[in-house]
Image (spheres, rainbow, N blue to C red):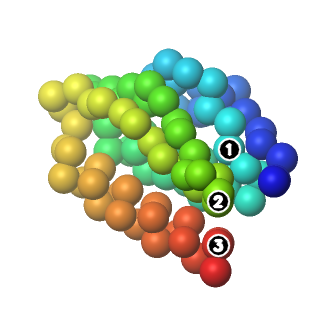
Amino acid sequence: MDKRISINPLVECLYPRIALLDEICVSEKYALVMLGLLKDMAVVAGSEGQIEVYKVQHKEGSGIPIIECISTLGVDDALLEELFDDFAVRISALDS
């Protein structure tokens, strides 16, 4: 199993519109893709919205992160779904 690292310190410093309600630890091989997703989520949140990431689970066997979050009314949820779809493609590419 790969070593997991916490990305909370980076996210809390760089993306104030992303509220992390739990420690987020991901495999080193997924860290950059995960940080990219959170950066894109912060852009979608804009200056008025907020996204709360309340849990990150890991797919059994592979360690692929699964994000559970909720957004405020000012966030375009359809655009968030597109980000998650793109994230799934990027994560899958790392596993192949």
Q: Residue 26 — which label?
A: 1
Percent x, y for residue 84? 37, 56
Quadrant in the picture for residue 92: bottom right
Frontmost residue, 64 versus 16: 64
Horizontally, residue 20 falls left or right of residue 50, namely: right
Q: Secondary structure at mark 1?
A: strand
Percent x, y for residue 5? 77, 39
Frontmost residue, 46 versus 62: 62
Horizontally, residue 52 falls left or right of residue 35, namely: left
Residue farthest to the front, as pictured: 61
Mark 2 = which residue? 62
Residue farthest to the bottom, as pictured: 96
Percent x, y for residue 27? 73, 50
Horizontally, residue 71 falls left or right of residue 63, namely: left
Residue type highlighted by circle 2:
Ser
Distance of label 2 from label 1 (alpha carbons)? 11 Å
- Residue 17 visible to the viewer: no
Residue type highlighted by circle 1:
Val
Mark 3 = which residue? 95
- Residue shown at 36%/33% (left/top)? 69
Residue farthest to the top, as pictured: 21
